[in-house]
Every structure is written in C-alpha cells, then in structure tokens.
Image: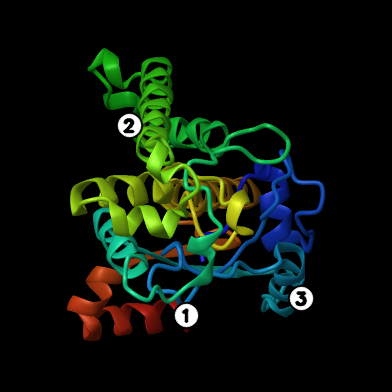
Amino acid sequence: ESPDLFCGDEILKKAFVGGADLAGSDPPTESTAVGGTSDGGVGGKNAKRHDGRRHLRHVTESNDEDKKGKKKVKIIHFVRNPFDMVVSNYLYHSQDPTPEKWVHVDDPCQNLYKNGKSLASHVIPTLVSGLELHSAKNITNSSLHPSSLQETMQKNLADIASLCRSLYRSDPSLRNKTFYEHLLHHDKWNGLRLSSAQMIAASSVANGHKAGGDVLRMANNIVRFERLKEQSKKAERRRSGGGGGGKEEGDVRVLTVSMDDFIKNATTNIMKFMDFVF
C-alpha cells in the first residue's frame, strides 16, 4: 500500500510516539493511513489500503518502551523505483483478462478528493520542504529554489493531467469505454502514458482508494518519515543538553529499503534489517 501521510507534523509524531490517531488530520483525505509499503499495490498484492486510525492504534499500543517509559518506534519503509512501478502497473493491468476489477470502474484522470483538493496540492509542499531539508545550503541553480521548484512541479503535474484527459475518452469512439478498455485499445506507448498518469497523479477516489497517485505518495512518505526522524533527533538533543555529540537517535528510527536492492542483495539487506530491528 501507499498510505497518505498528509497530516501535520505534530499529529504524525503523536500518532507514532504519543498514541494519537489521525482522526482530524489536516487536511483530511478519504484514505488516511500509516504503515505498509509504498509500492502502490502493483501486482495486485497490496491494492487495498488499511484503515488509518485502526492501524495507528495498533502501532502505538504495541510499541516497546525504554526504561524511562518513552515509546521507541522503528519504521521500516519499503519503496520501489518509480520507473519500475509505472511499467509494472501498465503490464499488470493490461493483461487479458485483467487480474483486478477496479480498472473497469476507474477514472484514471480524477485527481481531486471530495473536498476539491488535489493529490498534488498535498504532496508538492512536502517535496519542496524535502529539498530544503537536504539541499538548502548547496542550492546554486535558481530553478531549484523552493519557489521556482514548486511552480515547476505544479506545471508538470498540470501537464500530466492534461495528457491523461487527451488519452481518456477524448475519442468519440471511446467515450463510454472503461479505463481497462482504453489500455487494450491504445498502442503500448499511449497505454503506458495513460496508466503512468494514473499512477502518478490520480487521487484514487474514482476506484475506492484501491490504486492511483502512488508515485507521488511514495515520494511524500519518504520525506515525511525523514522529517519525523530528524525532529525526533532534535528533541533528543534538547533533552540530553547536546551531550550525545550529535549521535542521538531519538524516539523514532526509520529504515528505508529499496525493494529492487533488497531482491538483488538479499543477504546484505536481511542483515541490515535484523540489525535495525534488534
């Protein structure tokens, strides 16, 4: 799954460390969840998203505590190469017969939630803040400054939405055809472009939050988890008075694992995984 981490930083911190759930997160979404992988359910194994509040209660109630009673949280976040994601998405769902039913009811170009907000409007500020977090001191190219980058990303995502609409139900002969029928009708190039637009920017409202926008969600979640980890480290430095020499771990630790690397280097990654967990 590719959960929506669109809540504020304090709510996200409380959810993992302080026992809060995401009810009332800002802004609310139709699919708010924490946990799982950001592989978008490509391959059908993980297409259904968790209920976020129930999952968070389970996470926060089962966390181990240290001797001082503070919760220690370890998050393992599996991610995929976005190029592999979009190709896999197209090849899997264009099979005949298709393995999943949602492609018969989906509007791949629906990028808005019921509150009128787009997936991009939630994600772009996070991605820009991620650039500031890692690169602010080293930015020399004016096109990479936050204001310019945000404008560029908004234009790119608007272009993706326009591309999607040009490929979906724009031909009169396809006006009543489903997303799946479009994938079969288009040549491989346009079929890949249509399914990639859905994988990048769709809100997933049209298919009941089973798939869509997973590339943006994955990027958003990487930055949000990294920011949560850094905030936890800063809080630990304040508690310790800076006596940890900058090596404080904080209450939250995050291990981001590339699924491609995990497959190629299974032994190394298993050892890394075991060392992180135990």
**Mark 1 belongs to which amino acid?**
Val
The residue to which callout 3 is attached is 61
Label 1 packing within 10 angstroms: few (<14), some (14-19), many (20+): few
Q: Residue at the location (73% across, 36% down)?
A: 115
Q: Earlier in the sequence, mark 3 or mark 2?
A: 3
If you read the primary sequence from the N terminus, does the residue marked by circle 2 or circle 1 appear first? 2
Percent across and percent down for residue 208 are 64, 59
Disc 1 target residue: 277
Q: Which residue position holds label 2?
A: 135
Q: CA distance from mark 3 to mark 2?
A: 36 Å
Labels 3 & 2 near each other (Cβ < 8 A): no
Q: Nearer the viewer, residue 165 or 175?
A: 175
Above or below: residue 55 compared with residue 277: above
Instruction: Quadrant for residue 130, please give it.
Output: top left
**Which kind of residue does numbered mark 2 sit on?**
Ser
- Residue 125 is left or right of residue 78, and the answer is right
In the image, 271 versus 57, the foreground residue is 57
